[in-house]
């Protein structure tokens, strides 16, 4: 289709942006969306810093009770998964569609493993009676209640984002299969990659805050 | 030419059923009308709640409402008016309709996302209203949901909170859509300082929606988790700090009042040039002041909490910042007055509403400065003075601007003209009624009448009775507006493309506009409000090539 033009009084022509196919608009829109996500997590980090300031010692002690190995493995997995997702995006642009699809699949698989390990961690805590509103936790020191309250809320919200990420990757795979994502039309894939980068970035900050201050 | 009422595109392709054609439409104009319909229905419910409270307050002592019912009523009024009516407000209704028309675009950047916003809004409405029927009655916390009461009360706060959360999401998506649309879809040649000022208002609003709403979203979510799981982040018995809730709540909810009014300021700047037949005074300063109100407005939330035990230093800083917001706002008001100076003023209905709103808003704004002064605030905190200030800015300001905008664009939206005489009577009723209703409350508040009580000392009786009379006038004025619009649809004269001699792009296309608005996109190399001898300078031929 020919590109639409607007004309000034002298008859000079200027290209019109097509709202149905606007690559830059879709990318910009997604950046704005990520900004709202950052604001949302930002509030939680703010709360963390206020309470950390008030209960520094207890926070450090509570942090020591988390399993740094499980958390550390998860960090490595997430780092690797952003690499594979980025590579998938790159491969798509280079017209290597099959490789790209495999890499997206691998990324999704790593995300599932991440959730599995997270699930193990949570169930150990819950088994020990450490969860919001439990009778055991509620009689402990207030700093401890707050630490674990924040821990469950923040890793929970992050986990929710991982679940959404897995759903998005399945969607990307479907789109690749049915031609919705092609080497010359990659916006969805670009945005999902961007999203996954954001999810891992949040974890990169969460990990030291919760697991490493007690080391 | 068939208008958007005759043909539409839906998210699932085409439908025969007209109801499905409406509720699944991705046309920004239809979505705007969907918003308008639901919003104004709820608006009238909330007005009824207000009139009921006024009736209860007509005499001191208990009349016909239980104190607890009274608490539920003002919460219902507040939640409905704020979250369901005025926050989506001008932006979702008039903005949705007008934004693409004014920048020369065929739709918003993300039409399907726009429809999703509306559906989320409906989900929020249903969730909020469901608590009227379920649980232990409607929330009784006030629209602010302050912890720890909102954690403890038996009332059905959970569904109201969830509703506010969902509505926030809807609002964010609308804001995102507007930001991208304004950046990407302006007609070729239209740079930021050639945009109509309503678009500037929407732009500033959209950024507030995007940046501030997530803050309240997560905060309300934490209260929800508090009630369901007992996380403890705002619960003092578990070490949580309720003051932090207040901070986070107002970080959103103060910018939210600018989010309500900035599109309204935009409407003023649209209506004034048209009904004075001259270009607006200080275009750039109005545009930039919208942005700076949004910016500074983000940093003043602490003035809601002067009595919460904040440090003196923090109070002085917040007080100073609050005074600073008055500067860009004052710039706007002076610009508007300067626009009137030596203009050929036409006192048509939209112009009356706009002038009324400027008067009311000036009172509201200046009393806001009174409240921003720390000493005065300690005295006036939690009195009717605050409530009067708020209603002067939001009811006398935003709602007047909104209704003015509805009159102004009514011919564009419906293709018909309303009755001018009825319009002016309705304005008169509302303007007199509004001032009778709220001005006495400044005095009552100043003399110490607290807000949110179902009863008052007998010395305050005259104030409340004058207010009661005003409330009746306001309600009848609103009904007359509604009736006038209804009769206009039935028997109004054909409006034609440009009944007001407007200059902005929406007046260059047929009323009501066709699907996708512009057959050809114009090239915009001119300022938005240019008149010569009372006539718009710029004219287009049928192919949107500029001929003059």
Image (tube, rainbow, N blue to C red):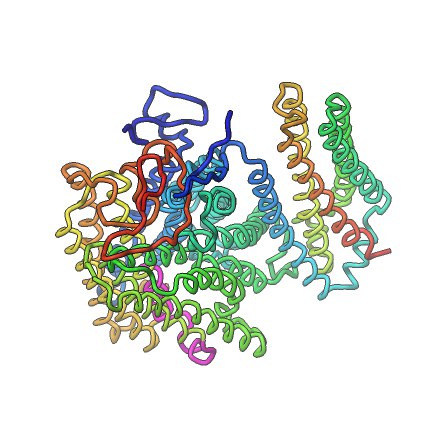
| Residue B380 falls inside the magenta stretch | yes
Q: Is residue B455 magenta?
A: no
Q: Nearer the viewer, residue A208 or B71?
A: A208
Which corner quadrant holds the N terminus of chain B?
Answer: top left
Residue B173 x %, y %: 50, 43
The answer to which image quadrant residue B333 occupies is bottom left
Dominant secondary-structure state across the stretch colored magenta: helix
- Residue B299, percent from left and from top: 54, 65
Judge from the rendering whether residue A38 lies leftward or rightward of residue B478; answer left or right: right
| Picture layout, residue B326 above or below residue B41 | below
Residue B181 percent coordinates (x, y):
48, 43
A53 vs B52, nearest the viewer: A53
In front: B448, or B469?
B469
The outermost residue toward the front is A10
Q: Is residue B64 left or right of residue B322?
A: left
The residue lying at 25 percent from left, 40 percent from top is B497
Res B47 seen here: no
B382, B15: nearer the viewer: B15
Residue B131, quarter of the rendered image: top left
Residues rendered magenta in the picture? B373-395
Residue beneath the point at 21% across and 72% down = B462
Percent across and percent down for residue B543 are 35, 35
Residue at image location 38% in from the left, 54% down from the top: B527
């Amino acid at each position: 289709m020919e590109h639409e033009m607007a004309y000034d009084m002298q008859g000079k022509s200027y290209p019109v942006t097509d709202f149905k196919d606007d690559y830059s608009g879709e990318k910009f829109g997604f950046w704005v969306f990520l900004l709202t996500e950052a604001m949302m997590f930002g509030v939680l980090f703010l709360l963390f810093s206020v309470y950390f300031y008030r209960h520094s010692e207890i926070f450090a002690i509570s942090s020591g009770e988390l399993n740094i190995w499980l958390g550390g493995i998860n960090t490595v997995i997430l780092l690797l998964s952003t690499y594979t997702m980025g590579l998938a995006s790159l491969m798509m642009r280079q017209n290597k569609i099959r490789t790209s699809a495999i890499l997206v699949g691998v990324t999704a698989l790593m995300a599932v493993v991440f959730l599995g390990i997270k699930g193990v961690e949570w169930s150990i805590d819950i088994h020990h009676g450490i969860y919001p509103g439990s009778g055991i936790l509620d009689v402990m020191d207030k700093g401890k209640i707050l630490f674990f309250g924040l821990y469950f809320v923040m890793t929970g919200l992050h986990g929710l984002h991982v679940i959404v990420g897995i759903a998005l990757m399945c969607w990307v795979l479907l789109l690749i299969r049915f031609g919705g994502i092609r080497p010359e039309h990659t916006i969805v894939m670009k945005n999902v990659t961007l999203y996954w980068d954001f999810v891992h970035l949040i974890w990169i900050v969460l990990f030291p805050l919760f697991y490493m201050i007690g080391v | 030419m068939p208008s958007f009422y005759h043909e539409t595109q839906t998210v699932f392709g085409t439908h025969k059923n007209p109801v499905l054609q409406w509720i699944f439409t991705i046309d920004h104009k239809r979505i705007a009308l969907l918003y308008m319909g639901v919003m104004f229905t709820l608006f009238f419910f909330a007005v009824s709640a207000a009139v009921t409270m006024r009736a209860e307050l007509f005499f001191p002592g208990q009349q016909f409402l239980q104190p607890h019912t009274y608490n539920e009523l003002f919460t219902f009024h507040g939640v409905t008016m704020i979250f369901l009516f005025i926050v989506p407000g001008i932006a979702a209704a008039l903005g949705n309709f007008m934004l693409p028309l004014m920048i020369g675009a065929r739709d918003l950047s993300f039409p399907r996302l726009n429809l999703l916003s509306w559906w989320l809004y409906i989900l929020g409405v249903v969730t909020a209203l469901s608590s009227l029927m379920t649980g232990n009655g409607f929330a009784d916390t006030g629209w602010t949901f302050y912890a720890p009461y909102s954690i403890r009360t038996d009332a059905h706060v959970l569904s109201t909170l969830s509703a506010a959360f969902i509505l926030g999401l809807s609002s964010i998506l609308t804001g995102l859509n507007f930001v991208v649309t304004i950046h990407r879809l302006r007609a070729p040649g239209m740079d930021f300082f050639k945009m109509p000022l309503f678009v500037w208002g929407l732009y500033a609003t959209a950024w507030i929606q995007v940046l501030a709403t997530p803050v309240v979203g997560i905060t309300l979510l934490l209260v929800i988790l508090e009630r369901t799981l007992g996380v403890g982040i705002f619960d003092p018995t578990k070490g949580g700090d309720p003051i932090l809730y207040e901070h986070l709540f107002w970080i959103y909810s103060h910018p939210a009042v600018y989010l309500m009014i900035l599109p309204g300021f935009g409407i003023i700047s649209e209506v004034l040039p048209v009904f004075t037949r001259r270009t607006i005074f200080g275009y750039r300063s109005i545009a930039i002041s919208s942005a700076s109100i949004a910016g500074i407005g983000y940093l003043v939330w602490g003035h809601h909490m002067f009595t919460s035990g904040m440090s003196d230093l923090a109070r002085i800083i917040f007080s100073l910042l609050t005074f600073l917001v008055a500067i860009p706002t004052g710039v706007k008001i002076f610009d508007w007055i300067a626009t009137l100076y030596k203009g050929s003023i036409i006192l048509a209905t939209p112009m009356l509403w706009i002038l009324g709103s400027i008067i009311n808003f000036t009172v509201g704004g200046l009393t806001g400065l009174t409240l921003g002064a720390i000493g005065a605030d300690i005295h006036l905190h939690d009195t009717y003075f605050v409530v009067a200030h708020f209603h002067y800015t939001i009811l006398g300001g935003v709602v007047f601007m909104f209704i003015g905008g509805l009159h102004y664009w009514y011919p564009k939206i419906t293709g018909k003209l309303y009755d001018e005489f009825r319009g002016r009577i309705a304005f008169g009723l509302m303007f007199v009624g509004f001032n009778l209703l709220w001005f006495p409350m400044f005095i009552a508040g100043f003399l110490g009448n607290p807000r949110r009580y179902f009863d008052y000392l007998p010395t305050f009786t005259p104030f409340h009775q004058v207010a009661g009379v005003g409330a009746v006038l306001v309600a009848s004025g609103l009904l007359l507006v509604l009736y006038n619009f209804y009769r206009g649809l039935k028997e109004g004269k054909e409006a034609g493309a440009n009944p007001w001699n407007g200059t902005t792009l929406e007046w260059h296309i047929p009323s009501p506009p066709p699907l996708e608005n512009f057959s050809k996109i114009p090239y915009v190399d001119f300022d938005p409000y240019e008149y010569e001898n009372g006539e718009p300078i710029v004219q287009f031929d049928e192919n949107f090539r500029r001929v003059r």
